[in-house]
């Protein structure tokens, strides 16, 4: 097949890990006689430097006209004090492309149990996916901003959801659960927030259409606790934008390193943005030591969700699995005395195993 893929490497370690994900995709293209065309654009801090804005309209247009977008990471101390922030580029991309669903699968590898702060027996059987609502909630509600009023500084964020927004994300979670262990946990703060009461009501209604799926509700604080006490109890978690942001960082810790986890951001069509869940890690940028696995597994999700190439996706996933089983380690997941691979060498080890 022919596909056009926009790469948005961004800042910090973004370009290093994106380059390796592109190499993995080229490996797949060669093996299966696909033709992937890549086109690189700026996003985040580097886009601010180059164009004055974290996401140029032309970049958004290029993404709209592509089959998929592969993103690295945005942000860094250099842009922390500026008027516009790199993160606005990422939020603008998600909103601009209508990517309302963020999928973050969490499945620890047994060879990395040492890297997790949880005991190995707690990690046994952990295999869940967080479906985070991505274009609404506290990140996007209006009014939002700073105001001066009665001689005081004021700042407001608004948590707003419509029934339509809740229904489509819970619907997606139920569809995903149908192909897994058929359990959806909807996470909210319905004992306090009006938006959460609506969320719970609509989630309950939506799940009725899926007779094989069991839906339960969990308050977000309880969920945060259960993620470390009984992470194996989850199958599909569906939740509000910022709750999902917080819970997925927590969940990432279970697998041993933020560097390992991929994500997919999807909307109504096949177009998606694929990015590792880690940030730009400015402290290790340019050293060639970042873990490329989160980015490479994001490329696998791209093959599955945007290009409908599940066999190709599995080939990458199995190669990553085998590389880890064979003891390949970047610095973030190595134990004392283990040989440490560079970003590039880890990607080589994975590509060899494809
Ligand atoms: C994430 C990140 C972003 C978010 C930031 C960089 C805006 O933390 O993708 O989880 O909060 O969504
Ligand atoms: Mg986050």
Image (cartoon, helix red, strand yellow):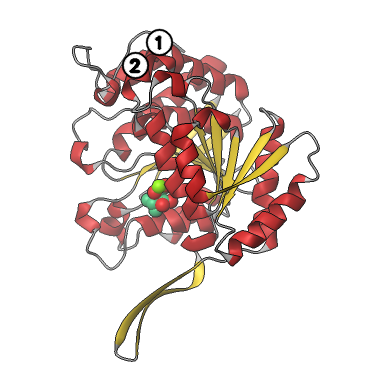
Q: Position of residue 259 (x, y in %)?
A: 35, 31
Place of residue 7 in the rendered image (x, y in percent of width and height, measured from the top left): 42, 41
Q: Nearer the viewer, mark 2 or mark 1?
A: 1
Residue with the mark numbered 2: 348
**Distance of mark 2 from mark 1, alpha carbons?**
15 Å
Crowd tier of the residue under label 1, counting other residues whose Cα lies within 10 Å: few below 14, some 14–19, many 20 or above:
some
In the image, residue 160 above or below residue 69: below
| Residue drawn at point x = 36 percent, y = 55 percent | 87
Looking at the rendered structure, the secondary structure element under dot 1 is: helix
Q: Residue at 69% across / 41% down in the picture?
A: 215
* Residue 273 locus on image (x, y percent): 50, 43
Q: Between residues 271 and 190, which one lies in front from this camera angle?
A: 190
Q: Residue at x 30, y 85 (%)?
A: 152
How dense is the environment of label 2, judged by Cα within 10 Å: few (below 14), some, or many (20 and up)?
some
Q: Does residue 176 sit above or below 33 in this rendering?
A: below
Q: Which residue is mark 1?
A: 325
Q: Give how far across and how far down residue 66 sits, in percent.
A: 54, 44
Q: Is residue 6 visible?
A: no
Q: Nearer the viewer, residue 105 or 39?
A: 105
**From the viewer's perspective, is 230 left or right of 48?**
right
Say if residue 346 shows up in the picture: yes
Which residue appears at 65% of the width and 41% of the height?
173
From the Cβ of disc 2, is ligand 1 less than 8 Å away?
Answer: no
Tell whether label 1 touches label 2 (CB within 8 Å). no
């Amino acid at each position: 097949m022919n596909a056009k893929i926009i790469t948005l490497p961004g800042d910090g370690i973004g370009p290093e890990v994106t380059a390796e994900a592109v190499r993995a995709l080229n490996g797949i293209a060669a093996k299966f006689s696909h033709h992937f065309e890549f086109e690189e654009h700026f996003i985040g801090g580097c886009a601010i430097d180059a164009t004055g804005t974290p996401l140029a309209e032309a970049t958004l247009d290029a993404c709209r006209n592509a089959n998929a977008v592969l993103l690295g990471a945005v942000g860094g101390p250099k842009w922390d004090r500026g008027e516009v922030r790199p993160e606005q580029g990422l939020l603008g991309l998600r909103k601009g492309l209508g990517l309302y669903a963020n999928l973050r699968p969490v499945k620890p590898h047994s060879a990395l149990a040492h890297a997790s702060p949880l005991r190995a027996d707690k990690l046994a059987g952990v295999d869940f996916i967080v479906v985070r609502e991505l274009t609404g909630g506290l990140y996007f509600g209006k009014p939002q901003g700073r105001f001066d009023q009665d001689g005081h500084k004021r700042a407001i964020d608004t948590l707003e959801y419509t029934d339509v927004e809740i229904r489509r994300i819970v619907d997606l979670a139920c569809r995903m659960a149908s192909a897994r262990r058929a359990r959806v946990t909807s996470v909210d703060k319905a004992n306090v927030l009006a938006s959460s009461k609506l969320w719970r009501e609509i989630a309950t209604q939506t799940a009725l259409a899926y007779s094989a799926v069991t839906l339960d509700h969990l308050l977000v604080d309880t969920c945060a606790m259960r993620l470390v006490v009984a992470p194996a109890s989850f199958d599909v978690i569906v939740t509000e934008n910022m709750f999902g942001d917080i819970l997925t960082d927590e969940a990432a810790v279970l697998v041993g390193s933020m560097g390992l986890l991929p994500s997919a951001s999807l909307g109504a069509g096949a177009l998606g943005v694929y990015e590792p869940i880690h940030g730009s890690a400015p402290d290790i940028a340019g050293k060639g030591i970042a873990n490329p696995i989160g980015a490479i597994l994001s490329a696998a999700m791209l093959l599955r969700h945007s290009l409908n190439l599940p066999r190709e996706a599995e080939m990458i996933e199995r190669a990553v699995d085998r590389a880890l089983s064979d003891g390949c380690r970047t610095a973030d997941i190595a134990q004392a005395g283990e040989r440490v691979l560079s970003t590039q060498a880890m990607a080589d080890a994975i590509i060899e195993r494809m």
